[in-house]
Image (cartoon, helix red, strand yellow):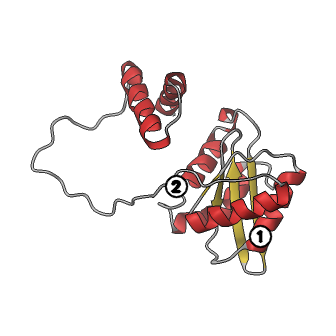
């Protein structure tokens, strides 16, 4: 495990950036923790499991959120076993797991065996990567940086996204998120 996101990123950033779209959540969390560690409500969990070939698995969790996993290996049962044991010994609660389906399902099975807890599949999500922009003939409006007067609108959009994409969240959480992001 790592004490801070900077040390974790030294070990993982090049790997994560090689497939940036797929790893954007983990990268974003770690970069935010590195820049503003005080934004974490609780101590984050940052870990890698390595072998002779390098990083087999990387994991990030900002309680009470789900653990986010990275691995470019086709099979990593042994690494998941070590990760699950480390989480269990450390007393970490794991409310869920995010990652590519095969990785998430494999880890969930190992976690259930090691922790004695049950699991069930949740929402299956996808990541889309924009590689080209086709500009329309005209576009009303213009791009600008959000201002303080925009907090309510940005919070409304964030809340609508949370509800549609995740089926969770509150208006207050969306407002706090909007304020944090706009300050950053």
- Give the residue at the far right of this rendering: 89
| Image location (x, y in percent) of residue 148 | 41, 21
100 displayed left or right of 133: right
- Give the residue at the far left of this rendering: 137
Residue 70 in view here: no
Q: Which residue is mark 2?
A: 24
**Nearest the camera: 75 or 42?**
75
13 displayed left or right of 183: right
**Nearest the camera: 4 or 107?**
107
99 displayed left or right of 129: right
Residue 99 in view here: yes
Q: Is residue 30 above or below residue 132?
A: above
Q: Is residue 16 above or below residue 177?
A: below
Q: Which residue is mark 1?
A: 79
**Mark closest to the chain's N terminus, 1 or 2:** 2
Foreground disc of the pair 1, 2: 1
């Amino acid at each position: 495990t790592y004490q801070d996101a900077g040390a974790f990123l030294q070990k993982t950033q090049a790997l994560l950036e090689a497939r940036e779209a797929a790893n954007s959540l983990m990268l974003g969390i770690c970069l935010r923790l590195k820049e503003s560690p005080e934004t974490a409500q609780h101590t984050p969990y940052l870990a890698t499991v390595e072998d002779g070939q390098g990083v087999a698995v990387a994991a990030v969790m900002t309680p009470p959120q789900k653990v986010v996993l990275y691995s470019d290996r086709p099979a990593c049962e042994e690494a998941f076993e070590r990760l699950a044991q480390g989480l269990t010994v450390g007393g970490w609660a794991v409310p869920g797991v995010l990652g590519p389906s095969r990785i998430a399902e494999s880890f969930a099975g190992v976690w259930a065996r090691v922790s004695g807890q049950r699991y069930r599949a949740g929402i299956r999500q996808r990541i889309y990567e924009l590689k080209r922009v086709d500009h329309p003939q005209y576009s009303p409006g213009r791009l600008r940086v959000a201002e303080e007067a925009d907090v309510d609108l940005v919070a409304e959009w964030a809340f609508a996204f949370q509800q549609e994409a995740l089926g969770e969240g509150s208006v207050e959480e969306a407002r706090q998120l909007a304020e944090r992001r706009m300050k950053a």
